[in-house]
Image (cartoon, rainbow, N blue to C red):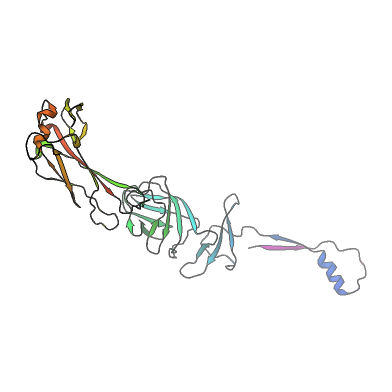
Amino acid sequence: MPTIDITAGELPPPQCYASEQDRLDAYAAALIGNLNTGAEWVTSQTAPGNTALYWLRTDSSDRPIDVMKWSGNPTDLAWIRSSSEVVFAGTATGAGGNYAVTNSPAYPNAASAYRTGQIYTFLANHTNAGACTLNVDGRGAKTITKDGTTALSANDILVGQVVTVLYDGVNFQLITQKRDLTRQSLRQFLTYSSAGVTLSSFASDVLVPFTHGFVDPISGTPLIPFAVRVVLKRTAAGSVTFNGVSGVTTYTWYNGQEVDCLHFVSSGTAPYEKLPSFRYVADGTNVWVSVNLLGVVSIPFFNPGLTPADYQVKVYATALNPAYVAP
């Protein structure tokens, strides 16, 4: 606490004063007062001598950091920051998606509850692999969520990332969310690629399902892709040559290369003559693909003819993000 030291100064030479008040005034004017403050506040979870005052917190170099006031509320009994509601807590500790941070002084202390609306910022010490929690000053772990109450997915928090969360009364909602194509109201798309099945596993004009798995990320309802691309991937060693649908250009097809199935049309046998060799229909679960093998393996398109076991059918499907807003 501050102290005041008073010492006597020098009175003027003896003289007659008109009144005793004049004599007292002369004596008071000669007094010297010194105010010694010392350390008025230190890192502590104990109440200061005067809880009615606001206290200035400084760092080790005497730079001002926070203006704080002691809260005597029974649920607090702690220092409350009045200059900022964003508390930077340094680098987190913990592992496996369980983050912990420590403030100096603790905020709130172990006897007080998390304050709804309080924002904490910290540096992540590891990348999350799924659902996460945050424990501030040992007060208790609370779930970190996004989009309200949705649990975090892998890599929503990256090592070294600046993470900002707000306590909503139940969970810590993640403010610093990375750009996520499934949640942006922009021209964004979901893309799916099937591992494919061998062409030899098809029977002529029999529908084969390729599960696309598109769902609305908000409602969970199935989505039907608006664009589908069917390709043949050569899986055999070496190469083969084939003609385009016009019969003019010759292409060389190498191992691992994919060719769009629009290059192939049926030939030679009604009612399939000049129809696409590959046809598809999509629903909320699958892209159904049928193949007219006669059109694919016919000699006019290949030299030598295509061997079905050497090729894999793949499907690429695209669904529009339901949050998309047209410009």
Residue 74 x, y percent position in the rendering: 47, 70
Residue 117 as seen in the image, left or right of residue 297: right
Q: Main secondary structure of the magenta part?
A: loop
Residue 72 x, y percent position in the rendering: 51, 69
Asked if the magenta segment contains residue 167, the reply would be: no
| Residue 181 visible to an observer of this rendering | yes
| Residue 251 visible to an observer of this rendering | no
Residue 62 x, y percent position in the rendering: 60, 52
254 is higher (above) or lower (below) than 190: above
Residue 21, picture quadrant: bottom right
Residue found 45% across the figure and 69% down from its top:
75
99 is higher (above) or lower (below) than 70: above
Residue found 25% across the figure and 48% down from its top:
226
Q: How many marks?
A: 0
Residue 5 x, y percent position in the rendering: 72, 62
Asked if the magenta segment contains residue 5, the reply would be: yes
Residue 249 as seen in the image, left or right of residue 218: left
Task: State the extent of the magenta-drawn residues as a range.
Answer: 1-14
211 is higher (above) or lower (below) than 49: above
Residue 17 as seen in the image, left or right of residue 220: right
Between 146 and 248, the one nearer to me in the picture: 248
For the N terminus, give its image quadrant: bottom right
Residue 292 as seen in the image, left or right of residue 314: left
